[in-house]
Image (tube, rainbow, N blue to C red):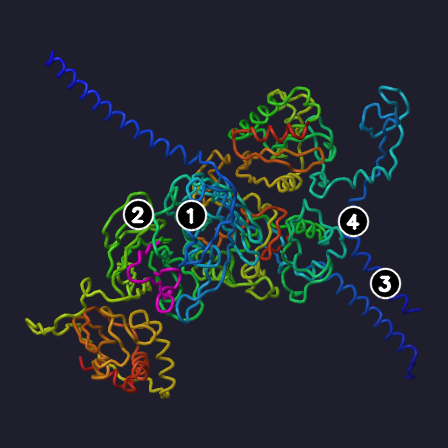
Amino acid sequence: MPINKEHISSVNKAIVRWGICFVLFWTTHADCQSKMAFITGGTYVPLYGRDSLQVTISNFFMDVYPITNEEFVAFVRKNPKWKKSKAKKLFVDGNYLVQWKSDIELDSSQNLKAPVTSISWFAAIAYCDCQGKRLPTVDEWEYVAMANENLADARPLKTYNQFILSWYEKPKTYNNSIGSTFKNYWGVYDLHGLVWEWTSDFNSVLVSGESRKDVDKDSNLFCGSAAIGATDLMNYAAFMRYAIRGSSKAKYTMRNLGFRCVKDKN
Amino acid sequence: MRNIQYILIFIGILLLQFSCRDGAAKNNGVAIFECPMHCEGDITYNEPGNCKICKMDLMEVAKSVRKVEADYISEESIFNLTTKWVTEENRTIELKDLKGKTLVMVMIYTTCKAACPRLVADMRNIEKQLPQENRKNMHFVLVSIDPETDTPEHLKAFALENQMDEEHWTFLQGTKDGVREFANVLAMKYKQISPIDFSHSNIISVLNAKGELIHQQEGLGVDNKETILKIKELIR
Amino acid sequence: MKFFKRIIQVFGFTAMAILAITSCKRENKNNQATVIDDASKIHISGEMEAELTAPPFVPAPVGNRSAKKLKIHMEILEKEGTMTDGVKYVYWTFGGSVPGSFIRTRVGDEVEFTLANHPENKLPHNIDLHAVTGPGGGATSSFVAPGHEKMFSFKTLNPGLYVYHCATAPVGMHIANGMYGLILVEPEGGLPKVDKEYYIMQGDFYTKGEYGEPGVQSFDMQKAIDEDADYVVFNGKVGALTGDNAITANVGETVRLFVGNGGPNLTSSFHVIGEIFDNVHIEGGSVLNKNVQTTSIPAGGAAIVDFKVDVPGTFILVDHAIFRAFNKGALAMLKVNGEENKALYSGVVQEGIYNPEGGTIQTMPTDTKETVENKSKKTLQEKISSGKQIYTNTCFACHQANGEGISNAFPPLAKSDYLNADVKRSIDIVLNGKSGEIMVNGAKYNSVMTKQTLTNSEVADVLTYVYNSWGNNKTNVTEMMVLEVKNAH
């Protein structure tokens, strides 16, 4: 068979052309739509319940990793109103993206693959919204976070609690790369060991900071305060998470506070 | 030629990325009209017609002027929130429609049996201590924590029952997300603890005519001297 | 008439006397009333920045200054520190030290308190000052997220020495990590003048590893709940106030100690060996007790003690629940310099032998004979350096950094005749402890050394270190020698 050189070159070119398109599409969309893990819903007892102690969670998807600095840079490029020089004071405090060198550049000490921190609740909401996602609720976050590598609910294990508590004693974990802690039962990384994470209804945590009073059912401050009682006085790690939520305001930004998004099943 | 094709495809993909939801915000095509003689001060209308006082034809407000006015909202103003609310009179508004008057705001839900009646009483108490003639310069706004139950009809009934149906009282029903966002702007905490009950912090907030937070009073039945003082400064 | 005059006179006197008594009483009442009323009504004139000091120092006394608006700026830092040699711990601190900065105010001051939470911190915190009259002692108003600050103010109404601490959930853990300190409210005109003032605060710590286990030790929640402390220390670490860090005074001076107890769990039986407190403000309040040996300081409480130091020497401050002092670190030192005063303290005057029934020490014999399993051959140098580590963890508190010991309490190991005379005896003492009277370098000691829980090779190393230091006879103590002594019982 005679070999038609021209034919081969045109086939090759077509392959190359589609290849380039595919790569371009993949690279640009892959970091916009980060990987998600499927979470099978269920019923559990969170530290702070409601009228009944149990809370029911529906099926949903959760980002495998927290949002990174790199992803957030891409976001502010697309949405200039969230640049640190542009963001409105109603929505962010004075430390918003404080470590960044400029509106769209990280400082040399920052790690592109580290979780983005120093962002407000409003900024986190806007990011997830842009992805067609939302922030997890406190109950959803806690539901996924009670897992260790092998168990959906590892809270009774001493080692589980001890691991989380030891994080509080490690400095500067916010600059570690995502994926540097364990992969949990659901396939989700970094819920413990990197940074705190925003939740959509963080302001449903009614701790006043006066922890001893919070034990009381002080109906003068909050109505329906029967739900204020904690269910597990031994879960120190959870107490700390609820304390950080209780101390936050939506425009606050903190160096140890990042976020990830979730999506409903349909 | 082929190179140009690739570049175009590349740019196309990039553009797809950049357009992330920006379109949704740009739906502000409604024209605004006002009396050229400003007989009614700054009052504007959403459709053409005659001035009620001098009967002149209303003129469309120049778009550039509107833009300046819109830009005038300061960074710390709650009028930056663009969520939609429905009043007890079934009107759909944005928070910036409340602009120009001193605002006294509180979050409640109408089925609440514990703290809310006392919060409502606190609001009424504040209103009573202010001079009658100032009321037209004020909005007392009660925002529902429970938008599912508190429909405009419910809110209207609640207003009537509590004799808070005059012009300066406004009740708002929002969306679930809108209410959460509004609460966060005022650093209010709340949590649904049963289908009909919420825990919530008891805060009465005072905002100036530009929508900036001036003062917050926390607690039930607390001494409201300072709150009154702040409001009087604002409406003077 | 005369008779009548008498009657009138007597009557008059009695009446006057009664009047005098009642008016006296009334005056008293008035006085008390005015004192209490005053505190809230004391006018403030001017404002000033408060001087804050890290322990063991305290700011200058208030003296005669008027009540002022006192501005306090305190920063919360979560940071790694040293618990004892080789042991690190992440402390949560008010002002960077454990205990936190000392705050000195006077009654009637209006304190404007700003609490700043460093941005690198992971946790929200707050402060509950026991000197505050108001809900939560300021806790609710000061609840502050990392990278933020909160301001609140209060008026000091009651004079006294008060504890402050963090009250954020889980509150026990925040206190156990070091979040406590003292605030002093001086009465009008200040406390009586003394020569030296120091700030000491006891705290108990709960670590994953046992006492002395090297490395970064994390907080152990279960031990804290069980109240099973690994460390009980003054000023946040073992040896914070010993050796070169000891507090000092000169003979003839009056020393005042502001002593607090942060807890979280244990009550302190605070005692200074060889001193008697002339005055104790019991529980930091207004009741003055005199001539006290040991004062009880509850967790979350304080005491002000003062005493005149009349003789020179090193005075040991301990929690007299004594195992805490010897095994967990609750030991501090006050070094007093100056001329001896034999009239007050003689030193040894006479000595002799007293042996009514032959006093050998009875211990449970170890019936399992051990053998040397691990014949790792360490060089002398390796043994000495490992021995030094063990020494600083185990022996240092009593026998001191250079083996000088502490006179009248712990015998010296430096140039020690007793030590150099008999190696086997030394091994036996380390293995099984020692009590009763011994003579070392011409001085008599009578105290108790507990049995040390060290492995055979650790005993060998630490003794080799001791024998090869401070002018001793350079014996190389082997594991085999230790084993022999052990098996000889």
User: Label 4 near label 3: C-beta < 8 Å?
Assistant: no
The quarter of the picture where the N terminus of chain C appears is: top left
Upstream in the sequence, badge 2 or badge 1? Answer: 1
In the image, taking residue C314 as reference, residue C176 lies left or right, namely right
Q: Position of residue B119 (x, y in %)?
A: 56, 29
Structural distance between the alpha carbons of marks 3 and 4: 21 Å
The quarter of the picture where the C terminus of chain C appears is: bottom left
Q: State whether residue B43 is above or below residue C364.
A: above
The amino acid beneath tag 1 is Val
Give the label on residue C284, or none: none
The amino acid beneath tag 2 is His
In the image, taking residue A182 as reference, residue B175 lies left or right, namely right
Disc number lying in front (2 or 1): 1
- Determine if marks 3 and 1 fall on one subunit: no
Name the residue beneath numbered marker 2.
C281
Structural distance between the alpha carbons of marks 1 and 4: 63 Å
- Determine if marks 3 and 2 fall on one subunit: no
User: Label 1 near label 3: C-beta < 8 Å?
Assistant: no
Upstream in the sequence, badge 3 or badge 4? Answer: 3
Question: The disc numbered 4 marks a residue on which chain?
Answer: B
**Residue C246 lies in magenta, yes or no?**
yes
Q: Which residues are magenta?
A: C232-257
Name the residue beneath numbered marker 4.
B22
Q: Position of residue C67 (x, y in %)?
A: 46, 41
How crowded pointer 1 is (Cα within 10 Å; few <14, some 14-19, many 20+) is rated as some
Question: The disc numbered 3 marks a residue on which chain?
Answer: B
What secondary structure is marked by label 1?
loop
Q: Residue at x 73, y 56 (%)?
A: A75
Name the residue beneath numbered marker 1.
C62
Give the label on residue B9, or none: 3
